[in-house]
Amino acid sequence: MSAWIPAPSPCISPCGLWGVGAGDEVITVPNTFIATLEAIIYTGATPVFVDVDPETWLMDPVKLADAITPKTKAIMPVHLFGHLLPWDEISAVAGEIPIIEDACQAHGARYKGRRAGSLGVAAGSASTRARTWAPSGTAAPS
């Protein structure tokens, strides 16, 4: 069961709950909003970037495996563009390392019937009515 906890950056509290701190590493992707990195840096941990799959723009499980070190305390993948990560592959690579989902850009998306943010040990999610998400600039502000 995932924990949903409000915070200035939605992933800060989950990082703290799972004991992420100074000297630790948290693996994430470089193509994310700055709040993902803020959550990691706020705890004193170091973000470690893993490149994305060029077809999906989501965390590459093969590159994730290469990035794990003894200092890895958590993995914070980002669901993007309404698409969920290849969860089975990511969780298999992670093993016992906690996965904290950044689900801020995948509201309503599902993986095998489960919603974004309900797959890992915890998740960060945020939304605001001021944001208008649409492809190719086709949406008008609400």
Image (cartoon, grey):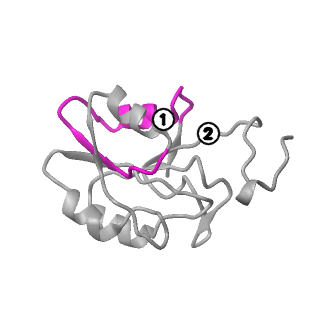
The numbered mark at residue 35 is 1
Above or below — where is 30 with respect to 57? above
For mark 2, give the secondary structure: loop
Residue 88 coordinates in the image, percent (x, y): 41, 72
For mark 1, give the secondary structure: helix
Amino acid marked by disc 2: Ala
- How many numbered discs? 2
Give the residue number, with chain letter if any, for mark 2.
126
Residue 79 coordinates in the image, percent (x, y): 52, 57
Amino acid marked by disc 1: Ala
Decide if residue 70 is on the left or right side of residue 11.
Answer: left
Quick one: label 2, few (<14), some, or many (20+) residues within 10 Å? some
Confirm whether the magenta stretch covers residue 16: yes
Quick one: label 1, few (<14), some, or many (20+) residues within 10 Å? some
Residue furthest to the front: 136
Residue at screen point 58% across, 64% down: 83
| Quadrant showing the C terminus | top right
Q: Are marks 1 and 2 in contact (CB under 8 Å)?
A: yes
Residue 105 seen from this side = yes
Residue 122 coordinates in the image, percent (x, y): 46, 46
Which range is magenta? 5-32
Confirm whether the magenta stretch covers residue 9: yes
- The earlier-in-sequence mark between 1 and 2 is 1
Residue at screen point 45% across, 51% down: 31
Decide if residue 2 is on the left or right side of residue 51.
Answer: right
Picture quadrant of residue 60: bottom left
The numbered mark at residue 134 is none
Residue at screen point 75% across, 35% down: 130
Residue 68 coordinates in the image, percent (x, y): 20, 56
Decide if residue 103 is on the left or right side of residue 75.
Answer: right
Residue in the foreground of this view, choosing between 87 and 96: 87
